[in-house]
């Protein structure tokens, strides 16, 4: 992000040099044409353009701005974002909920300020750090290692990034050199519940904090999978090889004959709820049988279909197969 700002600054400096040269030629031409040798450059410019010279403070977008206070004002933005994130930290939100807050509140604040000032690099870096800390740790201070690097998180959905918004030109600049991933449409399908999609996005990159992955960074005394207690816990065993996952998978296969987007929603919900059942067994010592997990998958997919039914009735017929 800081590199992008420097690019804008360089372009603006080059542009201003060109404008200055052209402006001098126009000024000399009109000075000779009008024959007013004693007339000042500012008055000639005013006659030509109808604009008058002014000084700071100036008003822009309804706010009064002082050039001497620009850096101080930008640092106030960091404080405002920090206050909001401290309030949000009290609430228990999913990763998808945090993304919504970052995109619709924090990034819009950043975008508004960036339209007024060229933000200092230290301010941009601090805001980016706040984004990362809140998304992965739920607080303004860094409390855990991010599951996915921030560079990947800021890619487009088609390149298998998370749904973070970018300014159009910045988006194009960031996206160059990154190939689109065709099956990203499965992860970010409209029918997928956002919190399910986010867990799937982390899983598809093999970044879920399984015991085997955590053991690479910090020794784990017990690396067995808590739902079966027969094998080491990694992505493949968790979602493919374990009898628990097979029991859930065999049942959802009966519901995935039809709309591709509903199939995506069911698979996405299955991965999310198997991971949730694992967390309940590990942290709460609560075992959730496969049939109960299957019931939650069907219930949430049906609820999602009813929500989509308010704008589109393309999927309402899929409910029958889920009720069996």
Image (cartoon, rainbow, N blue to C red):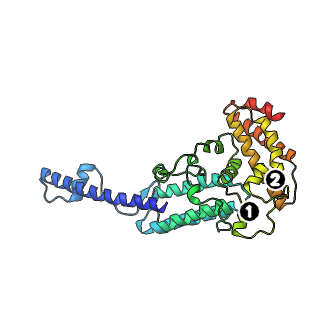
Callout 2: SS: helix
Mark nearer the viewer, 2 or 1 = 1
Q: Is 165 on the left or on the right of 311, as rendered? A: left
The vertical placement of 175 against 145, above or below, is above
The answer to which of marks 2 and 1 sits earlier in the sequence is 1
Residue 296 visible? The answer is no
Tell me the residue that label 1 is attached to.
212
Tell me the residue that label 2 is attached to.
277
The vertical placement of 285 against 193, above or below, is below
Q: Nearer the viewer, residue 75 or 291?
A: 291
Q: Are marks 2 and 1 in contact (CB under 8 Å)?
A: no
- Looking at the image, which residue is at 37% across and 60% down? 10
Q: Nearer the viewer, residue 253 or 294?
A: 253
CA gap, disc 2 to disc 1? 18 Å
- Looking at the image, which residue is at 88% across and 54% down? 287
Residue 128 x/y as whole percent: 56, 62
Callout 1: SS: helix
Residue 166 x/y as whole percent: 52, 52
Residue 278 x/y as whole percent: 80, 55
Q: Nearer the viewer, residue 322 or 139?
A: 322
Residue 130 x/y as whole percent: 60, 64
Quarter-of-image position of residue 118 = bottom left
Q: Is 266 on the left or on the right of 109, as rendered? A: right
* Label 1, residues with CA under 10 Å away: few <14, some 14-19, many ≥20: some
């Amino acid at each position: 992000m800081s590199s992008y700002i420097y690019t804008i600054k360089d372009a603006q400096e080059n542009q201003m040099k060109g404008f200055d040269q052209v402006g001098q030629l126009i000024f000399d031409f009109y000075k000779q044409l009008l024959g007013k040798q004693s007339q000042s450059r500012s008055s000639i410019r005013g006659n030509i353009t109808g604009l008058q010279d002014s000084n700071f403070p100036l008003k822009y977008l309804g706010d009064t701005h002082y050039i001497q206070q620009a850096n101080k004002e930008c640092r106030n933005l960091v404080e405002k974002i920090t206050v909001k994130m401290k309030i949000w930290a009290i609430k228990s939100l999913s990763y998808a909920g945090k993304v919504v807050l970052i995109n619709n509140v924090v990034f819009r604040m950043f975008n508004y300020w960036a339209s007024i000032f060229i933000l200092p690099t230290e301010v941009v870096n601090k805001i980016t750090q706040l984004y990362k800390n809140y998304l992965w740790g739920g607080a303004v201070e860094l409390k855990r290692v991010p599951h996915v690097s921030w560079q990947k998180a800021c890619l487009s959905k088609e390149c298998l990034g998370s749904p973070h918004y970018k300014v159009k030109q910045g988006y194009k600049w960031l996206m160059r050199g990154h190939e689109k991933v065709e099956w990203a449409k499965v992860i970010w399908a409209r029918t997928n519940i956002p919190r399910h999609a986010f867990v799937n996005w982390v899983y598809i990159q093999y970044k879920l904090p399984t015991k085997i992955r955590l053991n690479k960074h910090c020794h784990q005394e017990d690396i067995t999978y808590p739902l079966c207690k027969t094998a080491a816990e990694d992505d493949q065993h968790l979602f493919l090889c374990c009898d628990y996952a097979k029991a859930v998978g065999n049942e959802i296969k009966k519901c995935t004959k039809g709309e591709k987007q509903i199939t995506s929603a069911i698979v996405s919900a299955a991965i999310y709820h198997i991971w949730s059942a694992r967390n309940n067994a590990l942290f709460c010592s609560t075992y959730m049988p496969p049939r109960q997990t299957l019931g939650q998958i069907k219930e949430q997919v049906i609820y999602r279909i009813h929500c989509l039914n308010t704008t589109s009735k393309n999927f309402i017929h899929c409910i029958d197969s889920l009720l069996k």
